[in-house]
């Protein structure tokens, strides 16, 4: 088994809430509230959860872009939060980040060469000034972009290409760990597939370890070796891809899983969806006991007062970590499930009857990529317009209009 490269123990990040004329602290937003896990060398650990559950805050803590309220983080055996000055600067080279939005995370006034080469300005010892242009061009080539486009500006690229630029910048310093915060969430599905495939290729070639943050379970399944599920600042379940997708034990994961679209039409309607009641509570005032108890259909008295431990729970095989007082396996692979298996209450035994073919969008990603034969130029801006990242209406005319308008804009910009 691979060794861990990152070990997070009880990471906590609370943001003070200021109020009144004197701006005194009136409360705390408990964005991350006691998260522990390890990232193994060469693996991809997916982190999923609804918006606002603390994924990005966790990502920033792992890079030490923010100081934790408490907790420890070991990077390759080094206590990261204890490092100062030059030692910390050196560590920063080893952990890099790729952000979600390829439209706002790239400075529109800088050329691609400047953007990708920026890390060399911060760490000038990595590549001598004379070798920078070549180094940047090599990086562009590595991520499937034309090295001759080094003097172009971000607006001259499509969404997928911009994310490639973000990735090139992320790997410029040859890091060991790449934190990817929703790197494909803003992209069209077919372009998502290409970027995910690129990331897998780079992982193999460069020996990277990834933290892959997303709110979409299907995308995470496609790329992850293990997956951690977050709810309101806590990790509620952690396991291998199989453990999470095929024998999840936590009711929250089960609810998320039941909402993943089923690509196989013959299986549609065979799976009951667990519809969660109520909204996610505020992280400024999280429920006592199990944080999920206000929405959980299996809630009992103990759930209101006692925080369930995040420990290995039986899942029919070796068991995996889950923070639930009443863990029960939900099988989700299309296998017939024994109806005697203990199930949910208010949703009937639907929770145990899930049957899903090939992992939702994850399967689709493969299929789309295979079918369309997506090459590196498939996200050429002339085909994948810069506007396709916006939610589509499903109206093919309006999509065509948007493309035509973007093509026009591209032409005006010299494409
Ligand atoms: N700098 C900050 N100051 C105050 N609250 C913050 C800050 N950053 C994030 N939060 C809050 O912390 C919670 C978690 O946010 P975030 O980590 O961005 O979640 P996610 O990435 O899962 O959507 C949210 O309630 C958010 O409003
Ligand atoms: S501990 Fe209780 S409330 Fe929390 S997920 Fe388990 S059954 Fe539901
Ligand atoms: Mg986020």
Image (tube, grey):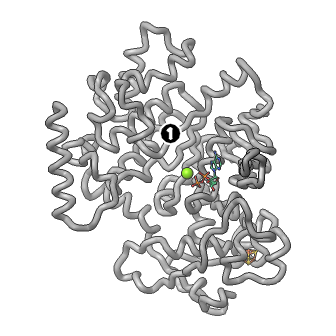
Image coordinates of residue 153 in percent, x first then y, are: 31, 28
Quadrant of the rendered structure where residue 286 is? Answer: bottom right
Image coordinates of residue 102 in percent, x first then y, are: 40, 41
Assign ligand 2 to one image quadrant.
Answer: bottom right
Q: Nearer the viewer, residue 364 or 2?
A: 364
Look at the image and tell me in which quarter the C terminus lies: top left
Vertically, is 365 above or below 347? Answer: above
Image coordinates of residue 81 in percent, x first then y, are: 77, 34
In the visual, does 231 lie left or right of 71?
A: left
At x 38%, y 23%, the residue is 138
Vertically, is 21 above or below 301? Answer: above
Quadrant of the rendered structure where residue 135 is? Answer: top left
SS class, disc 1: strand
Image coordinates of residue 44 in percent, x first then y, are: 57, 48
**Residue at the top extreme of this rendering:** 130
Q: Residues within 10 Å of mark 1 (few under 14, many from 20)?
A: many
In the visual, does 286 lie left or right of 139?
A: right
At x 33%, y 33%, the residue is 154
**Residue at the front extreme of this rendering:** 21
The yes-or-no answer for disc 1 within 8 Å of ligand 3 is no
At x 19%, y 65%, the residue is 396
Please give the count of numbered marks on the rendered protein: 1
For label 1, the residue is: 98
């Amino acid at each position: 088994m691979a060794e861990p490269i990152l070990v997070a123990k009880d990471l906590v990040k609370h943001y003070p809430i200021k109020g009144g004329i004197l701006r005194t602290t009136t409360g705390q937003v408990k964005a991350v509230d006691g998260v522990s896990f390890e990232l193994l060398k060469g693996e991809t650990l997916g982190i999923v959860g609804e918006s606002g559950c603390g994924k990005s805050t966790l990502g920033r803590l792992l890079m030490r872009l923010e100081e934790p309220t408490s907790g420890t983080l070991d990077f390759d055996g080094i206590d990261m939060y204890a490092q100062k000055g030059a030692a910390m600067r050196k560590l920063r080279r080893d952990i890099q980040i790729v952000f979600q939005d390829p439209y706002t995370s790239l400075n529109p006034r800088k050329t691609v060469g400047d953007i990708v080469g920026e890390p060399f300005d911060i760490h000038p010892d990595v590549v001598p000034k004379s070798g920078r242009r070549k180094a940047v061009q090599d990086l562009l080539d590595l991520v499937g972009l034309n090295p001759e486009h080094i003097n172009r500006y971000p607006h001259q690229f499509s969404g997928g290409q911009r994310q490639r630029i973000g990735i090139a910048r992320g790997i410029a310093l040859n890091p060991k760990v790449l934190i990817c915060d929703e790197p494909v969430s803003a992209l069209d599905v077919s372009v998502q597939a290409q970027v995910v495939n690129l990331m897998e290729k780079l992982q193999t070639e460069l020996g990277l370890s990834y933290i892959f943050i997303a709110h979409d379970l299907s995308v995470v399944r496609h790329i992850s070796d293990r997956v951690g599920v977050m709810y309101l600042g806590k990790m509620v379940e952690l396991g291998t891809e199989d453990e999470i997708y095929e024998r999840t034990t936590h009711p929250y994961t089960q609810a998320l899983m039941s909402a993943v679209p089923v690509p196989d039409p013959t299986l549609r309607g065979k799976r009951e969806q667990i519809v969660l009641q109520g909204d996610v509570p505020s992280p400024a005032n999280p429920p006592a006991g199990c944080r999920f108890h206000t929405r959980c259909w299996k809630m009992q008295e103990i759930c209101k007062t006692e925080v369930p431990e995040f420990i290995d729970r039986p899942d029919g095989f070796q068991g995996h970590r889950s923070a639930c007082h009443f863990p029960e396996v939900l099988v989700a692979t299309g296998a017939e499930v024994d109806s005697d298996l203990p199930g949910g209450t208010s949703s009937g035994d639907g929770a145990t009857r899930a049957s899903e073919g090939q992992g939702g969008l994850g399967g689709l990603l493969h299929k789309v990529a295979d079918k369309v034969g997506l090459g590196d130029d498939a996200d050429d801006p002339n085909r994948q317009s810069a506007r396709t990242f916006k939610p589509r209406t499903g109206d093919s005319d309006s999509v065509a209009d948007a493309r035509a308008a973007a093509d026009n804009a591209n032409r005006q910009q010299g494409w």
